[in-house]
């Protein structure tokens, strides 16, 4: 299959590309704006064409989509804290960018898969969200992601575009930018920096190993019914405090590094997805949280060359603004 993967130089996109080349022999073109989160290094050694461009740029998209059988859209601004501080890029990329991609898929007669998130459903105290649950996003990040999903649904309904949506739960694994909880805590623990825990740390997430999500996206692209949404949840739930404790154990750092900081405004308490529908389609998660977290910590330990330039670059200023203290 010939794929156009938008946002393929980011965390999940690059893992997806690696998996598709390795297990399916796809031909892949990546279109990526290379924001702070998108890095050429994430695709190093892979046989792909990388086009540097934005999904909201119709000319760049029209060129990149030529000859593609399917378009998979990972391109997004993805950090909730940044969406609270500076929402404009979230609106541009998620609303305008998704619109440009849908038009391009329509013109090219290509299948379309939108990568979305459990955050569009908002928080749930008990039980799990199904695809029939109403969308009730809480942050500018999740609201603009929900808006993009609705636009995709309208292109199915109005223009008959063969599009599907995959809503994943919190991903973790190699190549994740260190602003996100797990790599942030791993790198701080390895450096002896304090581990900043929001509020009481009892926010529960439904952790999904990035390769499991990548396999689900490929599976839905091949077997999903156009017009349908598929939730893809991880096999385990875990509160942030417990995640942090496990990271301390795996890195050999001490509990005294834990530092509670004021909670994120509007922080969702719990996310949980029912994945019955995608399981019925033939996908299952393969990696439990304990195993995946161990693999992830090992990967960061062994890939200093990947994260050192990040941790010594612009990320330092971001960190200082966010947590009011300097990194070691
Ligand atoms: N990380 C998670 O836990 C998670 C969970 C579920 C769903 N998702 C979704 O998966 C997708 C990928 O997330 P991620 O964690 O890999 O994010 P990421 O921030 O690591 O990567 C995003 C990529 O998109 C690119 N990009 C941003 N704006 C762009 C634009 N306007 N045009 C072209 N490229 C652009 C960036 O350069 C980067 O390569 C997102 O749509 C996100 O909403 C993420």
Image (cartoon, rainbow, N blue to C red):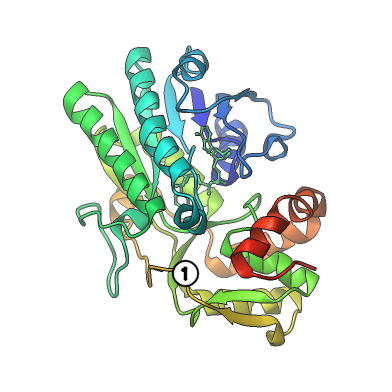
Q: Point out residue 36 in the picture as x, y percentages from the top left corner.
A: 63, 43
Q: Residue at x 70, y 70 (%)?
A: 325
Q: Going by the image, does 326 lie left or right of 8?
A: right
- Front position in the image: 45 or 31: 31
Front one among 239 and 76: 76
Q: Is residue 281 left or right of residue 56?
A: left
- The image position of residue 254, as x and y in percent, is 73, 84
What residue do we see at 43% from left, 19% from top?
A: 69
Identify the image quadrant of residue 320: bottom right
Q: Nearer the viewer, residue 89 or 171?
A: 89
The residue that mark 1 highlights is 264
Q: Is residue 318 above or below residue 217?
A: below
Label 1: which secondary element: loop
Q: Residue furthest bottom?
A: 256
Badge count:
1
Give the percent coordinates (x, y) of residue 120: 32, 54
Question: Within 10 Å of the Cα at label 1, are there few (<14), some (14-19), or many (20+) other Cα atoms?
Answer: few
Left or right of 243, for residue 110: left
Q: Tell me where residue 190 sits by quadrant.
A: bottom right
> Can you say which quadrant of the picture contains the C terminus?
bottom right
Q: Residue at x 46, y 53 (%)?
A: 83
Could you tell me which residue is drawn at 38 percent across and 31 percent down? Answer: 96
């Amino acid at each position: 299959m010939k794929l156009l993967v938008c946002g393929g130089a980011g965390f999940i996109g690059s893992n997806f590309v690696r998996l598709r080349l390795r297990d399916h022999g796809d031909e892949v073109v990546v279109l990526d704006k290379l924001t702070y989160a998108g890095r050429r290094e994430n695709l190093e050694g892979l046989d792909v064409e990388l086009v540097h461009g934005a999904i909201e740029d119709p000319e760049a998209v029209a060129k990149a989509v030529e000859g593609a059988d399917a378009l998979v859209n990972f391109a997004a601004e993805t950090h909730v804290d940044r969406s609270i501080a500076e929402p404009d890029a979230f609106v541009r990329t998620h609303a305008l960018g998704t619109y440009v991609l849908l038009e391009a898929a329509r013109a090219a007669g290509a299948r379309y898969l939108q990568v979305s998130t459990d955050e569009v459903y908002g928080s749930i105290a008990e039980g799990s969200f199904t695809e029939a649950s109403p969308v009730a996003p809480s942050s500018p990040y999740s609201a603009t992601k929900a808006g993009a999903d609705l636009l995709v649904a309208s292109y199915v309904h109005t223009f008959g575009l063969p599009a599907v949506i995959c809503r994943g739960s919190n991903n973790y694994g190699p190549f994740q930018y260190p602003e996100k909880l797990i790599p942030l805590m791993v790198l701080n623990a390895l450096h002896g920096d304090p581990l900043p825990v929001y509020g009481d740390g009892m926010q529960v997430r439904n952790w999904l190993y990035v390769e499991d999500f990548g396999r689900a996206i490929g599976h839905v692209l091949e077997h999903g019914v156009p017009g349908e949404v598929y939730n893809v949840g991880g096999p385990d739930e875990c509160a942030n405090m417990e995640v942090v404790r496990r990271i301390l154990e795996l890195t050999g750092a001490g509990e005294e590094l834990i530092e509670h900081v004021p909670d994120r405004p509007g922080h969702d308490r719990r996310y949980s997805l029912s994945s019955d529908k995608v399981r019925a389609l033939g996908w299952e998660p393969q990696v439990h949280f304990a195993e995946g977290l161990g693999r992830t910590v090992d990967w960061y330990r062994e890939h200093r060359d990947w994260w050192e330039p990040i941790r010594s670059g612009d990320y330092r200023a971001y960190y200082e603004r966010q947590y009011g203290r300097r990194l070691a």
